[in-house]
Structure formats: C-alpha cells, structure tokens
Image (cartoon, coloured by chain):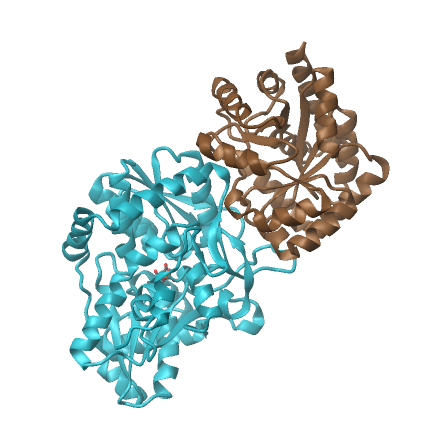
Chain colours: A brown, B cyan
Amino acid sequence: MSRIAGRFQQLAAQGRTALIPYIVAGDPSQDITVPLMHRMVESGADIIEIGVPFSDPMSEGPVIQQGHERALANGMCLSRVLELVQEFRKSDDTTPLLLMGYANPVMHMGYAAFADAASAAGLDALLTVDIPPEEVDDINAQLQRVGIDNIFLVAPTTPEERITRIAAGASGFIYYVSLKGVTGAGHLDSDEVAQRLAAIRRHSTLPLAVGFGIKDADSARTVAAVADGVVVGSALVNAMAQTLADGGNSGQAIEAVAALLGEIRKGIDNAAS
Amino acid sequence: MTINASEELYVAVPDEQGRFGPYGGKFVSETLMAALAELEVVYRNMSTDKQFQQELDHDLQHYVGRPSPLYEARRWSDSIGGARIYLKREDLNHTGAHKVNNTVGQALLAKHMGKKRVIAETGAGQHGVATATIAARLGLDCVVFMGETDIQRQALNVYRMKLLGAEVVSVTSGSRTLKDAMNEAMRDWVTNVDNTFYIIGTVAGPHPYPMLVRDFQCVIGREARAQSLAQTGRLPDALVACVGGGSNAIGLFHPFLQDETVAMYGVEAGGHGISTNQHAAPLTAGTPGVLHGNRTYLMQDSDGQIMDTHSISAGLDYPGVGPEHSWLKDIGRVNYVVANDDEALRAFHKLTKIEGIMPALETSHALAYAETLAASMTPEQTIIVNLSGRGDKDILTVAEIDGIVV
Ligand SMILES: Cc1ncc(COP(=O)(O)O)c(C=O)c1O
C-alpha cells in the first residue's frame, strides 16, 4: 500500500482528519526546508505538500508567489527539491510527501527522468496544477510505472460529468479547491464545500482533501467536519515571511509555523470530537 | 491553382484537443476548464451563425474601417532595388493596429455570452487600447493588466486606456512585462470566471484561444490575397510579419498556407542579439515547454524556468509564441528569423522618412527583415509586409534613444 493510502486509512481508523501543510521548497532559504518539514511533523502534520518554485505560478496569490520568487532567487530548482526529499527521508520514512508545482519544470526534466528520480528520492505523489485530465496520459504512464500517485484537482466549477472522469484517473486522494480564485484568497463558503464534497463522494471512494481558503484553526475546523484532509499553505508561508521581516531568525520562523500548525491541529481534532 | 493534400493539413488544426501537432492544448488549472469548454461551444456555434458573422462584418467595416489598403511602397522599394514591397495597412485600423480585429470579435462573443466584464493583458498597450475601446462601445467594465515596466515605456497608451474608462492594473510580479500581465489576467479570470470574459490579445493561451484569435485575424490575409490578385494579377512571392505572440503574422499567413509558391517569414525580436541571451526569440533560440495554457517553443533555462526577455518593443517582449507557429516551424512551412533592436530602429526611421508612414516598433522588426529579403530578390517579385501598427505610441521611446526630450 502507498504511504498516502496507508496514512489516510490509519487516520480514518482513529477518526481523525489529515493535516496537510504546504511550504515552498527553498523559501526563505535552502537550509530551512528539511528542518522545517521535520518540525511540521512534530507539530501535527500528516502529509507534507512541498511547492516546487516556478517563475510563473499562475494559480498562486501574492503570498505564495513571493515564496516562489524567494526560492528561485536562492537557486532552488526541481532536482534540488528532490534532493531535499531524499534528505528528509533519511530520518522520516513514514510521512507521505507530495510535490505541488507546474507542468514546465517536470516536462523539462522529462516525465520518465522525473519519475525515476522522484521514486529514488522517496516521493509519494505529484500534483501539477496545470495538467488537467485532458493532458495527463503521458505523465501518468510514467508515474504509474514507479508507483507515484497523481493528485487531481476538482474545482467549484467542475461539472459532475467531469468529476466522474477525474475520479477514474485519480489515486491517493482528490484535492478539492474550495473557492474560485488563487491560493490565499479569503472567501471560503463552507456550505458549498460540504455540498461539493458530497457530489465527489458519489463518484469516488478516495479520501478528499480541501485547500485554498483555509488560514486558521476556525476555518480548518469547519472544513475538517466534512473533509478527510485539510491543506494549509498561504498562512504558513506568510507566518515565516512575517517573522523574518520582523527581524526574526530561521529558527524563530520555523517555530512560528510550528505554533500555527499546532493551533490548526487542535481545531481539526476538535471538529472530530 | 490545384488543391493538394496540404490544404487539408492546414485546416485540420487544431484538432479536438486544441493541438497543432504536438503543440497547443489546454494546460490550465481545473477551475478554468469548464469556462474554456463553454467558450469553445459558443465559438463553434457563432462561427457558423449567419447573424453573428454579419454583425462582425458590419463592425469590421464601419467601426474598424476595413478593408485596410494594400499599399505599394514605391520609394522604399526603389531605394532597395530588389523585390517590390507592398504594405498591408493594419495601422489604418481604428486604434492603430491589427489588435482590434480580434477584440471586436471576442467582445461580440462576450456580449452573446452575457458577460458584463472583460479583462485583457497588454504589452505595448495596443491590445489594451483595442479592448478598452470596444468595452466603451458596448458598455462593458474593462480591466487591463500591464507590467510595471511596460506602463513606463508605453505611458501614452496607459492614459488612452484610462480615458476610455478602463482600469489599468500595474503588475509588479516576475519580470513586470507581458508574461506577468498574462499571469495576473489568468488569476483574475480564475477568481471572476462567472461574470468575466478574458479577451486574450494574441494566438497564445489555452485552446480555443489560439484558434479563435487566428480566425478573427485571418481577415488580414484574406483581404491581402484578394488585393494582391486584383492589383498585381498574381500572388506575392513572400510574406513578412513580426512575431510576438504571433497574431498579426498568423492572420496574414494563414489564408496563404496552401499556396506553395508563397514563402513566409516570421520575424522575432533579436533584442541585443541572439548570442547575448537578451532577446525575445523563442522559435529561433528556444525549446518546447508549457506556459500560459499551451505547449509551444519557450525561452527557458535548464530547470524549465521561464527566462526574462528583452526587446525594444514591448509588444514582442514575450518568452513564448502561439502554438501554431511552433508547428509551422517544425513542418518547415514558415521560416522564423530575427531582427535586432538597432535594425528595427533603423527601419522605423527609414519608413517614416521615405514613405511618410510611421510604423510601430514591433512592426519595424518585420520591415528590417523585409529590406534584407527584398534586396536578395528581383523587381519582378513582390513581398507583402504586414504593417501591423502605427508608431505614435513609440515616439517617446525613440526620442529617448535619440537623446531628445519631447
Ligand atoms: C503593432 C503591433 N504589432 C505586433 C504586435 C505583436 O503581437 P502579435 O505577434 O500577436 O501580432 C503588437 C503587440 O502588442 C503590436 O502592438
């Protein structure tokens, strides 16, 4: 069983919702990423989503855009991200790792070369924002060859017949984008999320994670009541950037993320009880 | 003229997936997929709808001022002493460039879809002005995204857009030019997809945009082909157009693609020179990849990051190119070449002085290459150059380079 499937099964047995933090690899420095990942696991992360920086992150709001820009300025690149995955795996062989990024760096490395390198590094899943089911055949063939899950998005605008099609090709979990907009936007409608998740469950038995509009313990609790996983990104990237802007060091930036994640973990676990 | 296999080849693209050979497609986030599917259906219906076509033709004739003349540049041709050069005068369109052919068409689609708000990206500002113009005429809200760098170098067009009632949003992310403006427009569209129509300004973006922008711009080539036959009794020997995203070039080229005797040259921005890496010539010096919803030739580094570009002309300062051009390059139907900043500037001055026609700096790249090409041909041969836009917007840029304070 894949690490992702195993993790969701284990959580379901405990009646808990997965907490999935998102950070940008190499933001704000290359050295911070692996220690930050370990600290996030200690603070309650169940799966870690690592943003692969891209020059043109079209689905990101300003907070994560700036994270991508900082990471690229630090020399972060896809092959280096995979090295960080490998480094993390040396002392954590159980936490599932998901890369989230854009098509071009992966395509430029070559789908086969990426699949080989990613599987050797210990990666579990890939989510490419701009590869919809229509364009997925080539990359899926390579990911399936090495047993890496391809995570698909379902959006508020996705019609029901497309959900069927997405569900047919998905593995690991399905990622529901909770709002029309970019990451970090603030207009999550929890009733709508509940309705949409119910619609997806009619077509798939995979776990459903929700992301894009969740920024604190309150919004996480609301979503956790109906979802199997909660993704938090902009709030964490912002906490780190803010700490450094206020004169803090990397250690303090990591602790700012840990503190916020700890609160969100409590919010989620309260939803369950 | 015989109909041959190549005719079918050119009308068969894009296919149902929006592919031109291995290029094109729909590489966008899931949120936009339904909107693109809806646009495709509406467009396919409208493109065979008599009333829609009549409305479009009426606008092109009475609002844009079409057909645009095909003008023989006698003094310029004489000064070169080679092929006779004809200029397809898109600069004489309302708002001063070919861009309006497309905005009139897409705005009609927006109207039929009941969208009350239109957005656009712009580099030189010509597409932004053309969009703001048609939005004013139809009473639509209009927001134009423009890179901070371009806002500075195209100040006149920024003010034009504001006078027309558009909101101009300054984009400060990335390289602060056209590609970043397009990222920001996509972000707006994802957020406001229910009430907003995204009027893309060139033959790039996800399917169906490269197809529908091409179709709206093909009026250039259809007219030019008929005008050439009427004025010279034959087809031209060569076509020349500048290539940013590639909309004026495809508009001129496409109706001639099956005419095998017509050679075609797309001129990219060579900037400071291809060897300096400071240019905007993905077809000449780039490799295939995915940006802004389609697979095409791009300027990218060894990690697949999109590189910063440089061109004297904001409208060519883009690291990608429409996917149909990538395909036409690979199959060898169109030759893609470059003209550098300094060559374009010389052509700008020369045409202004010798013909009394002041071209846009984008267009000046095509003129620079046409001059070299004409010199290698004979006076019995003819070239059509797409005079894609007028140069008023560039006067401040040219003055600054010449060290003159206006
Ligand atoms: C006058 C003119 N010509 C050419 C271009 C380049 O665009 P395209 O390659 O789509 O024709 C522009 C773009 O702003 C323009 O304003």
The picture quadrant where one finds residue B238 is bottom left
Taking the spot 57% from the left edge, 48% from the top edge, the residue there is A137
The reply to whether residue B167 is visible in this rendering is: no
Number of on-image labels:
0
In-front residue for pair B238/B188: B238
Q: Is residue B354 left or right of residue A233?
A: left
- Quarter of the image where the N terminus of chain A is located: top right
In-front residue for pair B345/B243: B243
The reply to whether residue B105 is visible in this rendering is: yes
Residue A150 place in picture, x, y as percent: 63, 40
Residue A109 place in picture, x, y as percent: 66, 56
Residue A203 place in picture, x, y as percent: 53, 27
Taking the spot 70% from the left edge, 44% from the top edge, the residue there is A26
The picture quadrant where one finds residue A259 is top right
Ligand 1 in which quarter:
bottom left
Relative to B363, say whether A261 is above or below: above
Q: Is residue B181 left or right of residue A72?
A: left
